[in-house]
Image (spheres, rainbow, N blue to C red):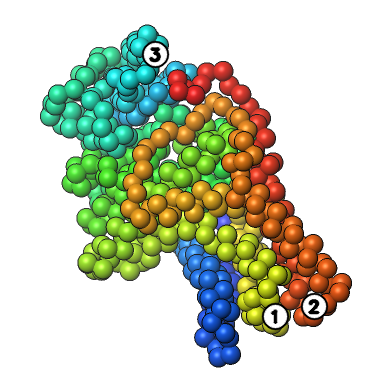
Amino acid sequence: MSIAPDKAPAPATKASLFLSLGLVCTLVAVFVYLLTRTVLFFSDGYPWHDRIVAGILLCAEGFILVHSLGYFVNILHVVRKVEPAKANAVGLPRLESYPPVAIIVSSYKEPLSVIEDTLTCFYNLTYPNKYLYFLDDTRYDLPNQDAAKMAKYRADVDALCQRIDVNCFRRKWHGAKAGMINDWLEFADGQYREGFRFRPYQNKPRPEKEKYVVVFDADMNAFPDFVETLVQTMEANPKLAFVQTPQYYTNFDVNRVARAAGLQQAVFYEYICEGKSSQDAMFCCGTNVMFRREALMSVGGFDHTSITEDFATSLKFHMGGWSSAFLNRVCAFGLGPEDLAGYFKQQFRWALGTVGLFRTIFLAFIKNPRAMPAVKWWEYFLSGTHYFVGWTFFVLVLCPIVYIFTGLPTFFARPEIFVMVFAPYIALSLGMFIFSLKRRRYSGHEIFMALLLNNISFPVYMKASLLGVLGVRGTFGITPKGQSASMPLKTFWPQLGLATLSFVALVWGLNLLYYVREPVAAIAVNTFWCAYHLLILATVLYFNWPEVEIEDAPLDS
């Protein structure tokens, strides 16, 4: 279900028609290229070793083409359904009453300055019937810690909560963020277990249980009117399990990693989320989200078996008959990762949890394909397989190198195929991708930076997706904040190793063009791709350059 904020500007009709037509043409071009590549692969005349290389390449290209179809179909849904709905929006009904809302944040050893900013924003929320909870998930019982330092941190947290009038909840540690929220749900429901510790610093009567629960990450600062619109939406749609809002990074303009990571978020939130929401297939992103407490309790709380508990819980909601929605309005802001170490840690956790859940999605589909409509299964399959993109990039970089040195796959030696089907596909795909985001006021340079950061992360995605397929769950870890440091160059051996191979292949390709010259078109095209990939891989050095250092860092930094 898609939601439009009040007084949304009407989209330009001519631009919308042009985009719709372009998207249809792009979808046709993607399908034609995929069909052509498949037919060529199954054609006779290729030796077995050629088929192996060509088959691996076809799988990589097929992955990109299928996900491109998913992306452009989502844009088409937005242009046809969401944007007209925004233009004609009359607004949600006014609230006649204010049901109680719990505002919660779970924190693990976050810097005190980060916590203070978040809790202050809690206090400043204008919604009248709010209850504020700080869920301190810090491990104070771990060995090899400075006991005095940890005791002081705990006392400082208590003093901060008391000063801002925010309730503080602690428990015996298990299950990281998902386990912490589930324990709080039990406590708020009147169930008490050993280890629960609650300090009612808000000092506010609680005559009834909260109807809705808003969840934030510890570094997310909400705008004062965050709650009202979401409550209006939930009250108007009793089957909504949650409403998700975007994330926005405040260090977007001062740090290159945070800027590129934020632009990746923008690509995701602008069209993918709106498209998924229009098909009632939006999944929770873990922060800046409001849940219906009844829905949470009906699925047993957050799914703590996955480190991407938000995505896993969304699947439970949809399979349980609940709906979801996305409100494309920035309602909160926070901090993005400020160096590659923090970014890679974040991406590894997301990739490991998402691919791990793909196994669950696949088995659930085999067991009961009628549990959800086909469109929802399609969207979950796309989301669950997204992080295999690392393997795809690796194959696409390696194939031109292999061709330069071995002449395989021989498919590359037929440049007329590229002229007929690849050129229209790549031109339309890139054109529509850039044009669609420019309509949302993002420049081509910004989009390119986001793609670069995604591409150089391929070893992280490869490792995480492999472990996810093998069923390795991993552990939850916070993304470091307030720090920017370079990683040792040896850390980037996959990126720099492939860059070296691309450089050698580039030199050899130029040599072949000068001395051999046959097949000149195929050698030229693959030499170009080697140069292109070399430039992409070299940007790992650009992103590894530290920019910002903030004194107040986490306790374990």
- At label 2, the amino acid type is Val
Residue in the image at 51% along x and 29% along y:
481
Cα distance in 3D space between marks 2 and 3: 67 Å
Say the numbered circle drawn on residue 452.
none
- At label 1, the amino acid type is Ala
| Percent of width and height locating residue 66 | 49, 69
Label 1–label 2 contact, CB within 8 A: no
- The residue that disc 2 covers is 520
Vertical arrangement, residue 214 with respect to residue 456, above or below = above
| Sequence-first disc among 2 and 3 | 3
- The residue that disc 3 covers is 146
Mark 1 element type: helix
- The residue that disc 1 covers is 413
- At label 3, the amino acid type is Asp
Residue in the image at 70% along x and 48% along y:
538
Q: Is residue 186 left or right of residue 102?
A: left
